[in-house]
Image (cartoon, grey):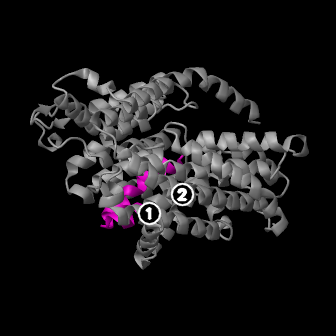
Amino acid sequence: METLGFLIDGFGVALAPHNLMFALLGAFLGTLIGALPGLGPANGVAILIPLAFSLGLPPETALIMLTSVYAGAMYGGRISSILLNIPGDEPAMMTCLDGYPMAQKGKAAEALAVSAVASFIGSLVATVGLILLAPMLAKFALTFGPAEYFALFLLAFATLGGITGKNPVKTIVAACIGLMIATVGIDNTGVQRFTFGVLELYEGVDFIIAIVGLFAISELLFFIEARASGGAPRMAVNKLSLSLADIKAVIPSSLRGGALGFIAGVLPGAGASLGSFIGYTLEKRIVGKKGNFGEGDPRGVAGPEAGNNGASSGALVPMLTLGVPGSGTTAVLLALLISLNITPGPLMFTQNADIVWGVIAALLIGNFLLLLLNIPLVGIFVKLLSVPPMYLLPVVTMVAFVGIYSISNTTFDLYFMVAFGAAGYVLRKLEIPLVPVILGLLLGPEMEKNLRHALDIANGDWTILWNSGLAISLWALAGIGLVLPYVVGPLLRRRMRGDAP
């Protein structure tokens, strides 16, 4: 009953006219961003963070808008997958397997509608799971001491590569780079570290500047290098002729995919890619020879779409309750919370209950908004695929520069953002992932603070770090998470390639 009361209060926040307007705007922009191949939800949220700051939005409104962008981008990723056979991001790869064959058979509108319905059901299932699980996990997290939190942060880094990661070693290198950047500034004992006498570095590196530079500016540099000036070819979208029976046929697949995706999202390091893969694989196993998977079976669209959207909501559970992001995009949202002086974790459910439950309620409302947007406005979203980057990228760059400048009104931050963009470009060229860098930068200070606190309590005795059953369990999970990508990862990637056309 207590949870229901908080949820009702959350609806009061989410249904405020200005919050509802920004939720709709975020859902619309997120779907547009998701439809563009290669951008993905993490880039989309990072690009639009400066917009939230430049508009001077209150914390709950900014978080509602960017969470809606996140959900919308997960919806939008299937548009280019179905129409062009080009995944909008990695989780949308499995949607290509049956979505594109449906489009080739003249059923593009049906495929898009099925994916929208499945995304809605998957997100709804996961949001209900978030409502039920998050308060319980938050109460459990109150039992954590500094040693347990240090082990938890270690677990986050150990599982960062995920079992679908391409190169776990490069993931660890990226996390170490982020942790090194996190040491810049004045520590909690008053000692300057790596500031080189630059006054602007005394308070450390701003998360938002690093995120916008690494994601948005590096993306601009890649487009400049490729000299991309033309749009992608478009496939005609037929008139929608989806019946109620067609929708009923994919509901079981959507429910199963949503539940599996939610579990994958809650697990650190697993994420939407795994949710999409197991959603598709399970449907293929259940239906068996009765289906025509790989040739345009609607259930082959519904399963992975429900899976990746379920995972996106599931990834919010560890972020809100433990302060540990469950995906790359939630790492970016974590940076937003910290920049707004909101501390994610179990205390957030008491100190900032209006924000937490407002966001959860906004997710429920956003699911309905996205369903209403995605079916009638498919034609508009498809047209975006033909917008040449030479027109689109200047707008993105302008938003990034104006937003960053509006935060501090100093040109130093603009130069710093460009420097991070160049660094992000180099790291991507070396195939070193950017999300671990951001996570190291975000979690580094808290990880160091908890380590210092634990050692102060124990008078420098390091055994306190594994002196409780909970800490030992977290260390064991971290060890498993570190080894698992080398064992399971290659097998899973071979299976994914085997299912790909």
Three-letter amino acid code at the position of disc 2: Ala
Q: Quadrant of residue 143?
A: top left
Q: Residue at horizontal 28%, vertical 29%? A: 180
Q: How far from the left and from the top, in percent, is residue 20?
A: 46, 73
Residue sitting at x 49%, y 29%: 431
- Three-letter code, disc 1: Val
Q: In this orientation, which residue lies closer to the viewer: 255 or 229?
A: 255
3 relative position to 74: left or right:
left
**x and y, in percent, of residue 400 in the image:** 36, 54
Residue appearing at x 38%, y 58% in the figure: 399
By secondary structure, the bulk of the magenta-drawn segment is best described as helix
Q: Is residue 158 above or below residue 112?
A: above
Is 51 included in the stretch rendered in magenta?
yes
Query: Helix, strand or loop at disc 1?
Result: helix
Residue 391 in view, yes or no: no
Find residue 461 and name its label. Answer: none
- Which of the two marks, 2 or 1, is nearer to us in this view? 1
Residue 359: mark in rendering: 1
Give the magenta-colored segment's residue range: 37-64
Q: Nearer the viewer, residue 312 or 213?
A: 312
Distance of label 2 from label 1 (alpha carbons): 12 Å
Mark 2 or mark 1, earlier in chain: 2
Residue that badge 2 annotates: 71
**Depth order, front residue of 175/449:** 449
Residue, x 44% and y 48% (percent of image)? Answer: 137
Q: Residues within 10 Å of mark 1 (few under 14, many from 20)?
A: many
